[in-house]
Amino acid sequence: MDVKDNKTLEPEVDVGTAADVEEVMKKYDRESNVRVWEGMPKTIVRLLSIIFSVYCIWVTLFSVAIPEVKLNVFLGSILILGYLNFPIRKGITKVNHMPWYDILIMVAGAFPFFYFAYHAKDIIKLATRVTKDPFMVAIAIIGVLALMELCRRSVGIPILCVVGCLLIYTFMNVRFGKVVYDLFYTTTGLMNTPINVCAKYIVVFIIFGAFLERTGISAFFINLANCVAGSSAGGPAKVAVISSALCGMVSGSSVGNTVTTGSVTIPMMKKTGYQPQFAGAVEAASSTGGQIMPPIMGAAAFLMAEYMGIPYAQVALKAILPAVLYFTGIYIAVHLEAKRLGLRGLSKEELPKIKNLLPKLYLLLPLIILVVMVSTNMYTMQFSASVAIGITILVGLVNKDDRITLTKCLDALEAGGKGTITVAVACAMAGLVAGCITSTGLASKLITIIVNVSGGHAIIALALTMLCCIVLGMGVPTTANYCIMAATCAPILMSPQIGIPRVCAHFFVFYFGIVADITPPVALAAYAGSAIAKAPPMKTAFNATRLAIAAFIVPYIFAFSPVMLFEFEAGTSTAMIVLQVIQICITSLLGIFGVAAALNGFLFRQMNPIFRVLMALGGLGMMIPGAVSDVIGLVVVGGIYAYQFFAAKKEKAMA
């Protein structure tokens, strides 16, 4: 069935409306709590967002201004857009209402950044002497406080608590003037790597994603997934896994992807026979995993490349196997659930025709061109993204079924501008975190503390880091979460006392920052899925966590076995590299099968608790590096698989 015809499902299944989703998101997600503008004010705010997006594209391509100019104009613009969109607290729905104090904060907060940008060369020449002027100190403090307040409104409290504690510690241990200078007037604070990468790369990719969504590529991905898996047992759930992986790698938003693809896939899953909380969980877990799906990885790959000091193409390559394991785990889980419930797939009449999809393969052209341009290193990432935006518009003009128009282009620019606000604010906070750590030399102290607490055991240090990532990631954009963890926890894991390789440490914090979107108690993607599925939010969140179990296991595996990320010891022969890759691919896939089957409790027939425990242990054994554990795991999983198969066959014969 073509995705355009999904309205036929509505009378048959009870699903949430857009209003239901909006209500749930306004309750839990700060990004969804925005001002209500109508008429001329709405047009003005829309126009400002469009101008901001166009300006960002122009700056990344043509501006030769120094970073202090570009970044301060960027932050000043973000403050204006931020306060125009986010009210002081949740639940304010008064139309065209912006109180005087918000206008005051917006103007006073944006002024320091524009002032700095205008006088940048003179301020740079003054160096530390700039803090001898009370006016310059005052505007720096106002600018930082305005950004922190916008962070509270648009991102949430957790990240603000981290920043607040670090600021207090920094002011207690470092001279006041030096702190102000470091955090506001240099590139070691607000203008650190996170906001620089955001202004240079991420904003253009957010705009690219907004344009791509308006070409109808989401519908294409869903129909393509239907052709691949729609007819198999429990097909709609498998369609959700495949389509969400494809859509999510571009969108970079777990919640946005859940709402976009979930509005089609969740009704299909419920109609097939899946429980509402399971249907919502499948979509949430799959949409969240889109951000670890190469080659785009929701724009986070570019940040990782910057932090790790390796080419983007290498980041995308190293992410392949963990991403395959993640989605394989979910795919196996939904297949076993379908078998347990005796569910069927969609009929041939309900499936889209592959011959109708083949002519639309040109929709993939922007993605292909983007990946080729970035991977070859012939062009800058921002230039490649800008070219991809142009190709997207041309592709949209060709698409007769969902032709892109001037209005859609303006909508995309507006969405790109608004979508940048929370990411930019959170990246600015990440810069403050990095600045505080640099100014105080806190990194070495944190390493000492973690080493003492963990007793030098890497597994304990990894577990503590995992908890930090999940707690901080509650409601925080993935990119910002990664920036903070890369500045705080990754160096600890890489310390000689812990000994985790650089690439493994960065991938570890990145993965656990992502799964926060489906981990209770604040699982925004799961809550979005529950709203569409009309299921209890917490049950949906726990189901999503169970489905995404690979995301909680795989990072520990590659932390101790870098081969999973295609990291090899120096001097390893080509033959040995190939052998190690084949071995870890096979054992990891079989291992994730064992774990998924154990959690589901069904394999040809119901498994008793003892078999489930053994299956889980056997699966983990194959995922843990080592020939002995691989053999033991293979024997256990293979033995239980064979027993379940023949027992089920015997039961069927006797029946």
Image (tube, helix red, strand yellow):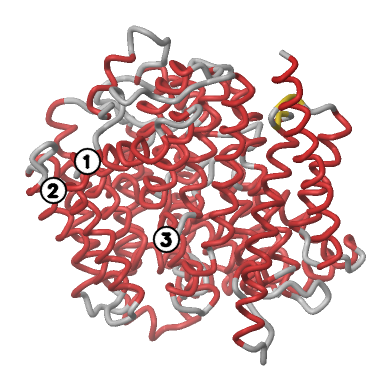
Please indicate whether residue 437 sits to the left or right of residue 640 in the image.
left
Residue 385 drawn at (x, y percent): 26, 64
Q: Quadrant of the C terminus?
A: top right
Q: Amino acid at mark 3?
A: Ile
Q: Which residue is mark 3?
A: 139
- Lower sequence index among marks 2 and 3: 3
Is residue 131 something one can see in this rendering? no
- Lower sequence index among marks 2 and 1: 1
Helix or strand or loop: what does disc 1 sit on? loop
Callouts 2 and 1 close, C-beta under 8 Å: yes
Mark carried by residue 396: 2
- Hey, which quadrant is residue 222 in on the image? top left
Q: Residue at x 63, y 29 (%)?
A: 543
Separation (CA) of disc 3 from disc 1: 46 Å
Mark carried by residue 398: none
Q: Amino acid at mark 1?
A: Gly
Q: Which residue is mark 1?
A: 216
Residue 122 drawn at (x, y percent): 33, 81
Relative depth, front residue between 161 and 525: 525
Q: Residue at x 56, y 17 (%)?
A: 275
